[in-house]
Image: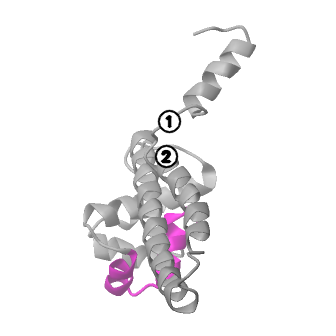
Amino acid sequence: MIVKKLRLKKCWSQEQLSQFSGLSVRTIQRIEQGQKASLESLKSLAAVFQINLDDLQQESDMNTNNEVTSNAQINLEEQKAMEYVEGIKSFYQHLFSYILVISLLTVINYFSSPSYFWVVWPAMGWGIGIISHGIRAFEIFSLFSPEWEKRQIEKRLGRDL
């Protein structure tokens, strides 16, 4: 996770880091997801980020041993913020796909059967999914959030907060 933090700090994409380090994009994705990196990969990343190899190796060891250290570990707030931003990014990608496909279907509908506007059905069905995705991504309603779950568990255990 520290690789992702360092990459985002420099405002680089995974593709840019791949070019700078000589590693494949897939390798960078795997390292960012917490898989163990080879020594050569760590050396390359340490050189690109201009940090000690020990700092990256410490995180690699931490991933395998599940130990927590203050410098190498992304704190919980940062991780939640990253997940939130990734959720919003996913929503916008979904919305873009929706607009593109529905626009294409509208053109096909217009030329194939202009008397019946059938494109409204896939637009409404997929639109419901888009709305649902947006509500989750932007956390509009937190009806069944982790906080709600915690309160319910505490309630069941008789430890009211």
Does 72 appear above or below 36? above
Question: Residue at point 67% right, 20% down?
Answer: 152
Question: Residue at point 25% right, 66% down?
Answer: 10
Q: Which residues are magenta?
A: 14-36
In the rendering, at what x and y percent does residue 150 appear? 62, 24
Count of numbered circles on the image: 2
Label 2 packing within 10 angstroms: few (<14), some (14-19), many (20+): some
Residue type, numbered disc 2: Ile
Does the segment drawn in magenta span residue 35? yes
In the rendering, at what x and y percent does residue 85 appear? 40, 54
Q: Which mark is residue 135?
A: 2
In the rendering, at what x and y percent does residue 86 appear? 44, 58
Q: Are marks 1 and 2 in contact (CB under 8 Å)?
A: yes
Q: How is the image coloured?
A: one colour
Label 1 packing within 10 angstroms: few (<14), some (14-19), many (20+): few
**Mark 1 highlights which residue?**
141
Real-space Cα separation, disc 1 to disc 2, in angstroms? 7 Å
